Structures are given as structure tokens and as C-alpha cells.
Image: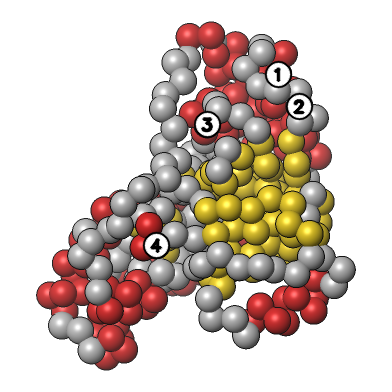
Amino acid sequence: MVKSTIWPHKRNPYDIYSLVLQEPRLPITQLARKLKVNPKTAEIWWNNALKKQIIMLPRLRRKSFLNFREYIYFLRVKDPQELYEQCIKDKNLTYFSVHTGFCNFEIISRKPIDPDGEIVLSGPRSDYHVTIPPDNTFQEAGERIVRKLTMIDHYEPTESILLFREEKYEPWDYKDEKLYEEFCNDLRKPLTHVMRKTSTYSDKIMNWYRTRNQFGHTITMFFPQGLHSYMPVTYALETEFDSVLIYLFSELPTPCVFYRIDFTLMMSIYLPFFPSPEARILPYKILSILHLLELFPSPFDFFLSVNF
């Protein structure tokens, strides 16, 4: 169990996370019943978990079907701030951020674009895989990963789950798109709000919600000390061993996001600013050991970037 320094309540916030992970729209009354507390207490706990960004709102990201394709660009530009201001006005962009490292800007677009600056890495993205962090510390995670590495010869790599889908997801109409726009960053939005914004009946909305994992990834993130305590770091790795890295990095107490851009594996992880510098070099140690075991290219054959 991770003892959070910013969580004043007696109940472990991981218990709340586990319940919302199972059912993102779990009502507060049911959350209270499962936690065996009154609804007012459960509501306070839930609101504090969100406010302190220990638990992030459940969100939805679409799989890589042809009609949902997204294109990712890692760039080197002269003025990241100027480009950031330009991106705010572009409705075709789903995400953009400033980096430092192998690139200084990232863009995710709904269609291919010709961005300013030097393109370091670009292409359509695969499906995502986001790990569900266990309730442990980075020190415990390191110990578990070392144990896994000592037995890695017995691990059978599996086929990549980071798929590039070569078909469209159908049926998908205007209403489906509006529902996605409403729910993509908050799967807990009140039903009445979504009905009003999309002019859609509740039956259609709930059927869409129940079938969401056919076309999307439900993502609920957990950060024991709050999101602000961690540094997001992105690795670009030339490897075919997706499953090995997912198997190892799933031990970290913060979520890891995996996807592919063509033949490059992208791995975004969250490392603590404090208190231990050992946690921040843990990924490098893992990659170095994998190289010594001849399961990975040289530990220097990767690019690293820090998100802001």
C-alpha cells in the first residue's frame, strides 16, 4: 500500500480507484455502499481524489479504426510557444504539448498535416494500452521488476496488442460522434447534460456507453501522490518486444501509456520528482538489463522526451 502524503482520509484512495475502474459511472450511492460509509462521506472522498488529481476522471480514447485514425507528430520547432498559440485555433488537432528532449513539440491530428519545423517522428498511431498500476511504491516496483527480470527466460513474448486496424468501425453516425465528443474526457458526465447537448434519448446513450469498449479504450488513471508529483516522460523505442516492456513496466505505481507509430514503440511513463532519484533512473536500468540479456537494442538506442 502506498501512503499518500496528500490524502487526509482513513480509507486508501486506491480502494476508490478500484471500484471506479470496474464501473466508470458508478453512482456515489453505490460507491458509498461498497465502501460501507454514508453517501456524504463517499462524495467528499471522491471529490478530494479528483481535486488532488489522485484519481483522474475516466475518459475514452478511440481505437485505431480507419474512420478514427489519428496522426502523431514529434517536432523540433524554433518557437514552441508560437506554435502552441497557433494550435489552439486548429479544430482538427486533438492534442498538442511542449516537450524537451528529442523533440520540443507534439501534435496529434485527425488527419495528415504539414506542420512547421523539423519532423523527428510521425505517423498514424496504433491502439493504446494503458497499464493499471498496482498499489505499491516505486521501491517495491523496482524489486518486483528485478524478480521478473531474473526469470525473463521463462517469459513467452506474446503478439503485440498495439494494433493498427485496417477496417472502419461501423455503424458510426453523427450522433455517435457527438456522444464521443461529450464523453471522451469525462465518462461520468450526467446523463441529462449529455441528452441535452446531443439531443439524444437515454436508451441510445446508454447502449453507446455499454458498447464503448468495442470501439474505444476506457482509461482511468491513478497517481498516489497526485498528478503534480510526477514528471511525464516519453520514450521512443525501436523494438518488437512490446509485450515484454508492458509485462515489466506494469509494476510501476503510476500508469504507463503504450502505442506504436509505425515500427516505433512509444512508452509514456510518470516518474516522481521526489523523494528518490532512483525511481527516475529505473527505466534506464530496465532497458540496460534487457540489452545485456540480448532482448533489446543498446540502452542508448532510444529517444527520450519530457512533456510539459
Residue situated in front as seen by the camera: 294 or 65: 65
Residue at disc 2, secondary structure: loop
**Rendering quarter of residue 204:** bottom left
Q: Tell me which residue sits at (59%, 58%) in the image.
A: 72
Q: Tell me which residue sits at (85%, 72%) in the image.
A: 79
Q: Which kind of residue does numbered mark 3 sit on?
A: Asp
Whole-angstrom CA distance, mark 2 to mark 4, is 34 Å
Which mark is on residue 68? 4
Residue at disc 4, secondary structure: helix
Whole-angstrom CA distance, mark 2 to mark 3, is 16 Å
Whole-angstrom CA distance, mark 4 to mark 1, is 36 Å
Residue at disc 3, secondary structure: helix
Neighbour tally class for label 3: few under 14, some 14-19, many 20 plus, Cα within 10 Å? many
Residue situated in front as seen by the camera: 214 or 93: 93
- Left or right, 45 with reference to 248: left
Residue situated in front as seen by the camera: 216 or 137: 216
Relative vertical location of residue 195 with respect to residue 116 in this rendering, above or below: below
Q: Which kind of residue does numbered mark 2 sit on?
A: Pro
**Rendering quarter of residue 86:** bottom right
- Left or right, 21 with reference to 49: left
Q: Are marks 2 and 1 in contact (CB under 8 Å)?
A: yes
Relative vertical location of residue 112 with respect to residue 264 in this rendering, above or below: below
Disc 1 marks which residue?
Answer: 291
Disc 2 marks which residue?
Answer: 299
Of mark 2 and mark 4, the one earlier in the sequence is 4
Whole-angstrom CA distance, mark 1 to mark 3, is 14 Å
Of mark 2 and mark 1, the one earlier in the sequence is 1
Q: Are marks 2 and 3 in contact (CB under 8 Å)?
A: no
Neighbour tally class for label 2: few under 14, some 14-19, many 20 plus, Cα within 10 Å? some
